Image (tube, grey):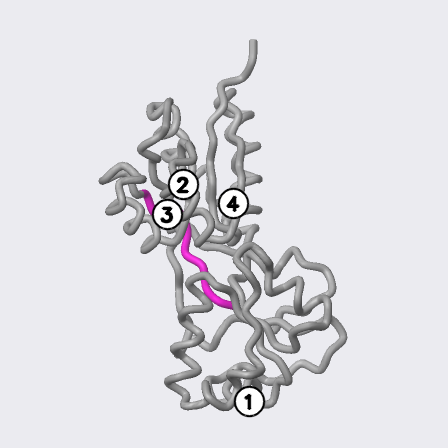
Amino acid sequence: MALLRIKLISSMATREMLAELAQQYQELAGCAVAVSSAGGLDVAKRLRQGEPFDVVVLAGDAIEQLVEAGCLVPGSRTDLVRSGISIAVALGASQPDVATEAALRSAVLAASSVGFSTGPSGNYLVKLFQRWGIYGDIQSRLVQPAPGIAVASLIAGGEVELGFQQLSELIHMPGIAVLGPLPPAIQSITTFSAALAVASEQPRLARQLIDFLASPQANAPKLRQGMEPA
């Protein structure tokens, strides 16, 4: 008999974590989970266009916007993980001091190119550079890849000297060195949440999956993928 199958879509930051948890859930519950991932903006666009999914995992504010748009079931949002921004350079490259806000500001000013994503971390960094008063000075050196393209891949390919992204999107990329998280005084934490899609044809199974994703059983894969359970 064919396995029951749930369709889940997420942004790129949680892709590896969800792939691991999907396999674990299939073994525990006998229900297959088909995970697809894309840039958060693309995920939202696909949902607004009516593409059918059962479960959606995105940054919490994006989940709320999709609830308001009628794409996700009100009251179904369940927080899964918290994720901070980390900093990376190419493997073997000079590693600047990024331990304090002042040191990181100097490193950004000195970098020939600075990469950041289109997701929540990218929006935050633009505001940070503006607050530092350096956005105009570095604007021509900023590199923001299209949604779904990892900043880490640009660092590894030599297109970006200093890159910022969620740690979960950096730790699996060969050819880069993670310098560490943003200094505590300026760190920005994104909460990623799951919600039930209005278009789900199997809401009971989808809710059971969401419960599993938020359960203590799911904590170890979250930590392995550079995130903290919410």
As measured in the structure, the alpha-carbon distance from the residue carrying label 2 to the one carrying label 4 is: 21 Å
As measured in the structure, the alpha-carbon distance from the residue carrying label 2 to the one carrying label 1 is: 38 Å
Kind of residue at disc 1: Leu
| Contact between labelled residues 3 and 1, with CB atoms less than 8 Å apart | no
Question: Does the magenta run of residues contain 80?
Answer: yes
**Pointer 3 residue:** 193
**Pointer 4 residue:** 220
- Please report the residue visible at 50 percent of the width from the left and 48 percent of the height from the top: 222
**Which of the two marks, 3 or 2, is nearer to us in this view?**
2
Magenta stretch, main secondary structure class? strand
Does 185 sit above or below residue 48? below
Residue 135: x and y in percent read: 45, 85
- Please report the residue visible at 61 percent of the width from the left and 77 percent of the height from the top: 162
SS at mark 4? helix
Q: Quadrant of the N terminus?
A: top right
As measured in the structure, the alpha-carbon distance from the residue carrying label 4 to the one carrying label 1 is: 38 Å
Kind of residue at disc 2: Val
Question: Does the magenta run of residues contain 32?
Answer: no
Residue 158: x and y in percent read: 72, 72
| Horizontal side, residue 40 vs residue 174: left or right | left
Kindly identify which numbered label has been placed on residue 84: none
Region in magenta? 78-86
**Pointer 1 residue:** 109
